[in-house]
Amino acid sequence: MPRQTPLHDLHVALGARMVDFGGWDMPVHYGSQIEEHHAVRRGAGLFDVSHMCVVDLHGAGARAFLQQLLANDVGKLKLPGKALYSGMLNETGGVIDDLIVYHRAEDAFRLVVNAGTRDQDLAWIRARVQAAGLALAVIERAELAMIAVQGPKARELLAAQLPPEERESTLRLEPFFAREIAGTGWYVARTGYTGEDGFEVMLPSAGAEGLWRALNAAGAASCGLGARDTLRLEAGMNLYGNDMDASRHPLESGLAWTVAFDPASRDFIGRAALEAYRASGNSARFVGLLLEDRGVLRGHQRVVVPGVGEGEVTSGTFSPTLERSIGFARVPRGTGAEVQVDIRGKLLRAQVTKLPFVRNGRVLIDLTPPA
Amino acid sequence: MSNVPADLKYSASHEWVRARPDGSVEIGITDHAQHALGDLVFVEVPDAGRAVKAGEACAVVESVKAASDVYSPIAGTVLEGNGALATAPELLNTDCYGQGWMIRLQPADPAALGALLAADAYQATLAAQGG
């Protein structure tokens, strides 16, 4: 029996098509995935992300512990509420998971990890705490629901649902900052996975349905995991399990920006493996692809780079904003501006692009084919 | 409840077949199938002249989230693929039994149609699958 979020019955009542996603019965769309996508780019959309796992880490030494556990440096989190995106690596540099860590107070941090990796993440973190001989509390907050409100109108719509005295401060949150909403148990973060402005709200389960209905009534569209995937692809954001996993390290997954090699004295897990890889000069490139021929890029399609070698599409879809197929691919060093992708035995032309494709409603790549 | 027109024949894999007066047949995907797939964004139909076997994958429909094969319910020779779907794949969502037809086929054996599911039998398979 797949697990259900606190919003499960509401999704069904709203007409969602439900699918099994990593052991959870989740809405993939409520009618049209493409309309839901556009709602987020143009107005506001709501996503149930309660399947994601919130883990609080408390106790003396929590910061130093996270500086060893994560490839990005929690030392950058100087102000309360600041958030950081990071990979959690194994000793060979492979990505165990990607996560966001929020700094709540000195020696009090909150991690949000992927649903599909929840159990192994918790086991890994607890084993590391034990190995370090620390008395840190690792608390899974399964009683919290999580709703993402995303789109140019999202912040305004969410603020209207807060106690009046909390609105101003919440609207003033900078990107990648979060705050507690006094008297509600809500934690509101200006983060997301769509390339649009918005908030992610962690709140006690009992209030989730009321918040969803209120935001729906205020004009935010219910959106499923289908739109979440096309939005994140346009926004150039990786999906764990597709674009990176325990056998691939961040430097070959477009995540070099999330690895803090400075200071050199910070000995995070996987560091030695990543340094050896860097020294080998053998780096694959992680790029965006825009399909020029008709078709749809999908994960695992073979990329052919004439005269250079072969690579692989890691994620692909049809982009509702571009009305073209886009994807990410791992390609050999030396790959130029054009590649071919093997789609059902035909070699189709694709243009190599920078990421992201779309950010804050704007198309950032050139859609005209090269001369 | 899915729309299942009474005058068509069906396969258990959610294709429909329409007998035409000239002895050829039109093939497409059912309302249940298009609804299950979601917004369709790419369709690949076979070229004229291709011989297909019954149950052979002969076309591909891609929704935003995945690619799916379409199987020919009967054996025959492809007379025409619906070229309009190249630029308007959404016709499969908006008019799957009309402008969203996919393949026109000359059946190898006209009697093969008789072995396909009638509308009520197809409707019963959907009901059994909870659809």
Image: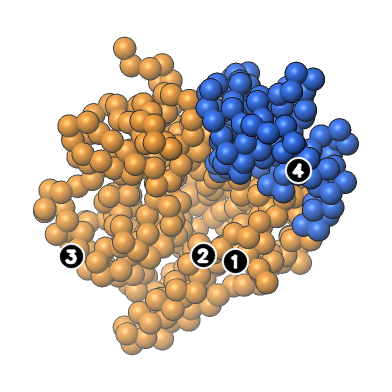
Chain-order first, disc 1 or disc 2: 1
Instruction: Tell me the number on the disc at residue A247.
Output: none
- Type of the residue with mark 2: Gly
Can marks 4 and 2 be said to lie on one chain?
no
- Type of the residue with mark 3: Ala
Between A338 and A281, the one lying in front of the other is A338
Instruction: Tell me the number on the disc at residue A23.
Output: 1
Look at the picture and state if A298 lies above or below A357: below
Chain B pictured colour:
blue
How far apart marks 1 and 4 lie (CA) works out to: 37 Å
The chain to which mark 4 is attached is: B
The chain to which mark 2 is attached is: A
The structure residue drawn at horizontal position 68% and vertical position 72%, both measured from the top left corner, is A1
Of labels 4 and 2, the one closer to you? 4
Can marks 4 and 3 be said to lie on one chain?
no
- Type of the residue with mark 1: Gly
Residue B131 lies, in percent from the top left, at 80, 52
Query: CB under 8 Å between callouts 1 and 2?
Result: yes
The residue pinned by badge 3 equals: A272
The residue pinned by badge 4 equals: B116
Chain A pictured colour:
orange
The chain to which mark 3 is attached is: A
The structure residue drawn at horizontal position 61% and vertical position 57%, both measured from the top left corner, is A49
The residue pinned by badge 2 equals: A116
Of labels 1 and 4, the one closer to you? 4
How far apart marks 3 and 2 lie (CA) works out to: 27 Å
